[in-house]
Image (tube, rainbow, N blue to C red):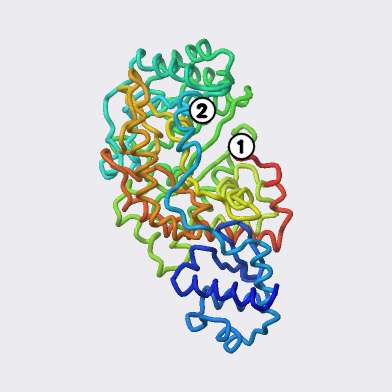
Amino acid sequence: MSTLKCHEEIERLFGIKHYSGIHRLGKLFSTGQNIYYYDTGTGKVLQLEDDALKIMQSLFELPDVNNVNELMRVQGISISAINDFCQTVVDEHLFRAFKPDRLYTPGHNELLEERVNNELSQVILELTGRCNLRCGYCIYNEDCDLNRDFNNSDMSLEIAKASIDYAAKHSGEKIAVTFYGGEPLLKFDLLKWAVEYSLETLKGKKITFSLTTNLTLVTKEIADYLAFVPGMGVVCSLDGPEYVQNSYRKYANGEGSYSRAIRGLKLMSDSFSKSENALSINAVFAPPYSHDKLNDINSFFADLDFLPPNVDINIGYVAEGSLPNAEIKLKNNHNVNPQVMDPLWSWLEERALIRPDIRGDINDISSSGIESSLISIEKRYLTDSPGEFYPFNGCCTPGARRLYITTNGELYVCERVGASPSIGNIVEGIDFDRLKKYYVEDYSEGSIEQCQDCWAIRLCSVCYAHNYTEEKFDSVEKNRKCNLRRSVHLKDLVLYHTLRENSPEKLEFLEHTEIY
């Protein structure tokens, strides 16, 4: 590269810095051993050394260095080194992420109707709004303003039939049928009918079934039936040992649910160990937060010798908004140490660094959390030159990836979204005007001001969940999550590259991991 071209390139970068645009183009991060640069436009990660590191620090961190002369004087960098840096920037197409005026994917725009009409992947039937427990952190309890409260509504056989008929008409070669609540086993009779009707109506398609249960209503009859439904997967809600489970997962009278839940898990394990269907466990990590509690939870699951092999155990925080702020304020206090600020992540990270194998231990609750973080970096958007559009963050194609059908037949984009605008009803079908307005146009318009200046725009996992009221998209609530998500993606980058430096063999499993 000629000296003139080099000068033009470095001044271009300082010009971007001067107008406060440099931080949207990439991110510096450190593992403690090395410093790296993540490029927003291409997804490339470059290890920085010597003069290249000084130049990057001048662009991102030193307010007093604003042109090539100051770069040479303050940092002592030669023209030759600047030329090498600029050559790399040009060759690798770095610092060239364009600034979008909207979020875009074909599935959210010109292909939306085709995919909604022909490529439905999952239909979720809310069999009942009732539950036999009153868990302290449940998103449907009275402290959570983001969702409906529990109700006594049950889905009718007619709505269940119409839902499965809709899935038959609008799905492709594969379809997943999920049963939701409340507690879906309160309507086990309807669940059985829906399974049998699905097997008959969806014949010729690859069908899978799933449900989540609190386990307290499981009988041998129920366990045996579910274990041998073709393609059935059951998620079992169990938080850990008795003192953990009974802290939040209680009956309305305050009685803990541990004894009935563990009995249900044993019944399910016995039945599923004789079949090819999969059991998984979901644990909620609730206040008070500590590494000691996580160790107790992990030891508890590791000692459950009656579980079938290869049970996935997932753990996560309580849903946002489901507990009074006083109970979670410590976790969000950035003036305290990482064990308090984000105890689950710091515990997961610690175990990832010391364990010989990310997937090694049986019934280890840390595996799934770490895997998802590492997968997000390994499978990130990566290209030689910047792409022409930015996707809808982590949003599925609304109405196609999944369709949530309530007890009264109202249609929603997802069971996790919470209070949100309906997109139709099972009798009349999808209202495409509402679908496009609320979940394409409003989401893009309400997000773009934040997204266009964000270095993590291509890593972003924020989706529709909890970003709506019943009437509209809530841009304030959605944008409030941005700093948190950026910090999560930064931690993911750091952990991935720390393992890449010190234990690359721990990442080998990622080569054989697919994203669905």
Asked whether residue 212 is in view, the answer is no
* Left or right: 71 as drawn, with respect to 444: right
According to the picture, the residue beneath numbered tag 1 turns out to be 305
Residue 143, x across and y down, in percent:
27, 45
Depth check, front residue: 136 or 197: 197
Residue lying at the far bottom of the rendered structure: 73
Q: In this rendering, is residue 442 above or below 118?
A: below
Tag 2: Cα neighbours inside 10 Å, few (<14), some, or many (≥20)? many
* Left or right: 381 as drawn, with respect to 455: right
Identify which residue is drawn at 59% across, 62% down: 38
Residue type of the residue flagged with mark 2: Ser
Asked whether residue 108 is in view, the answer is yes
Residue 92, x across and y down, in percent:
66, 62
Q: In this rendering, is residue 408 above or below 501?
A: above
Q: In this rendering, is residue 406 above or below 374?
A: above
Which of the two labelled residues, at mark 1 and mark 2, occupies the earlier sequence position? Answer: 2
Q: Nearer the viewer, mark 1 or mark 2?
A: 2
Q: In this rendering, is residue 498 above or below 374?
A: below
Tag 1: Cα neighbours inside 10 Å, few (<14), some, or many (≥20)? few
Q: CA distance from mark 1 to mark 2?
A: 35 Å
Identify which residue is drawn at 44% across, 25% down: 179
Residue type of the residue flagged with mark 1: Asp
- The quarter of the displayed image where residue 74 is located: bottom right
According to the picture, the residue beneath numbered tag 2 turns out to be 121
Q: Tag 1, which secondary structure?
A: loop
Dot label at residue 416 = none
Residue 224, x across and y down, in percent:
54, 19
Residue 302, x across and y down, in percent:
59, 44
Depth check, front residue: 1 or 470: 1
- The quarter of the displayed image where residue 408 is located: top left
